[in-house]
Amino acid sequence: PFFARGHDTGKRSSDRQRHDMPSTSAPPTLLQALTAICTRALEASFPGISCAIHVAPSTKGAHYQNNTAMPLFKALKDAGRSAEAASPKAVAEKLAAQMTACDTDGLLARCEVAGPGFINIFVAPAYLESTVNSILRHGPMPPPCAPKRVVVDFSSPNVAKEMHVGHLRSTIIGDTISRLLEFCGHRVDRVNHVGDWGTQFGMLIGHLKNVFPDYATKPPPIGDLQQFYKDAKKVFDDDEAFKKVAHAEVVRLQAGDADSRFAWRQICEVSRREFEKVYSRLQVELEEVGESFYNEYIPPVIRHLTEIGVAHDSDGAMVIFPPGTKHEQPLIVRKSDGGFGYDSTDMAAVWYRLLELQADWLVYVTDAGQSQHFELIFAAARQAGWVGDKRLDHCPFGLVCGDDGKKFKTRSGETVKLADLLDEALRRARADVEARLEAEGREEGEEFVARVAAAVGIGAVKYADLAMNRQSNYRFSFDKMLSLTGNTAPYMLYAYARVRGIQRRAAAAASLDAPAADSAAGFVLREPAEVNLARQLLRLGQVVSDVERDLLPSKLCEYIFELAGDFNRFYEACPVLGAPTAEVTASRLALCELTAAVLALNLRILGIEPLERI
């Protein structure tokens, strides 16, 4: 079994029930429904002509725009059928007429041809009202998809070394991708491929036995893992006798010596406890399956690769030159001295995940510097016939940089410890919360202050990372990420709390509890700001679908930032408490409820807990 040897530090992904993770999918998104109408219109207007359908949100007054006419006109010419339409505009006019005829669900208010062949699409208010009312009743749901088993490999720190800022992006991005895929209905294995094996353990075990000779009966009180590693390395570099001891320990460890394995497990356990402290603060769940897990699989996998002609001998080493890659350096699955390295472990891991776990999709979240490595690993797996129609993704990310644009380090030039970074974020957030409460003359208890500071501080670190395109480097700035303006976590948390505050005031004015999600008789969308907010809410499914396809969490951040802006414009233009009729008041309160639900869902997918008050 996968976790038979005690590698599992949390619940199995398939057994974990996450909040806001529905078991059913939503109907097709609005964009998908419009695209389907446009597809039927093309088939009815020009039978036998194949052309990609281009439908996109409009920025020029309409709700959406069908931009298919011009490429379709070219396709007609290429097929010798130009007599069927004299111009792209004529194509658009024919399509627009058929779009209205093909709309069997009352989705379209009207279609208008503009310019040389664009079709402006206006969605019927009644359709918007019916659709948002359905979402309000059932809650935000994921887009339709075929559930898969997905292995997401992320975080992956090294044993006996503290987690540093370099692990931040992998951990945060991997967690959000996992949450989103779980929301979509996939079965996700969140795998922490920790570095718990290698020649360095001979040095560490030897040092452990010297410094803590009673390690077998008393857990070693290693307080600073980084210092423990540095001390072991210094002795290794300076003492030839210790170097021989370390090499002997490596041999014993790899041979399965009981004492060496026990010492190794002690070191791993100390690291595991330190890692878990960071994961707990970040509210990240992972299943530890370290490099050592694959040791027993490496020899048979290499034999298999050799037997099928994928791996070849090269001066005593076994190497793979995957076809279709531009890199001259091969994968070395067995060194000339008979040893194994990262290439060996990663090939065994791919084999295990695809063929033993029967995963349908593998996602690796690592820095961009490993792109070449994973390109070769994936190509070799395909060459071996392991992949078929399964999906393999490497999600590369850029560096965390300081204000100078260089790799983020302390003033002394050392790597920033992740725990220290989180401590500082929490300290600054708490100071901001306390200063704001004092300025407003508010008194709140310690529990409130601690909860808000944690949500804002840790949330700010996460959101600043996730809001950036993961492939870009980004400059780490506490001042920017904790700002209440712009696309930041504090701004989004305040946006959510503001919506909840409006609902509380409405409930107080009516001497009722806050309106339940199903309390509105229906929506009445007449004002442009109401229609725009409803359209934005209906974009949720498409945005989730896009992130599932591209694995770019920044699109979620862009979406909720735009949603918050549309809500602000709605609130300014459409009084909620002072609406002209009770029906309109109920409709606008329902828009508030749905906006809050969508914001909360997205914040939780981003790993940020929304706050009812702030």
Image: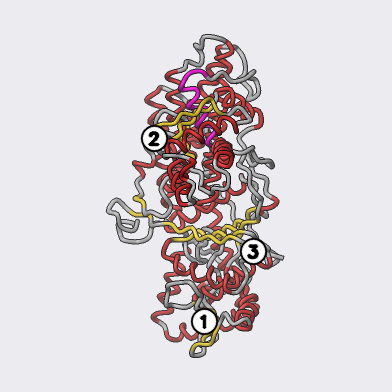
Mark 3: few/some/many CA within 10 Å (<14, 14-19, 20+) = some
Identify the magenta region: 526-541
Picture quarter containing residue 503?
top right
For this orientation, the residue located farthest to the bottom is 315
Mark 2: few/some/many CA within 10 Å (<14, 14-19, 20+) = some
> 242 or 505, which is in the foreground?
505
Q: Amino acid at mark 2?
A: Asp
Instruction: Identify the mark at residue 319; answer none if there is no mark.
Output: 1
For this orientation, the residue located farthest to the left is 404
For the point 57% across and 70% down, the residue is 382
Front tag of 2 and 1: 1
Instruction: Identify the mark at residue 7; answer none if there is no mark.
Output: 3
Measure how far apart labels 2 and 1 are at the Cα level.
56 Å
Total marks placed: 3
Q: Is residue 78 visible?
A: yes
Q: Is residue 542 magenta?
A: no
> 309 or 344, which is in the foreground?
309
Q: Is residue 453 visible?
A: no
Q: Which of the marked residues, 3 or 1, is nearer the chain's N terminus? A: 3
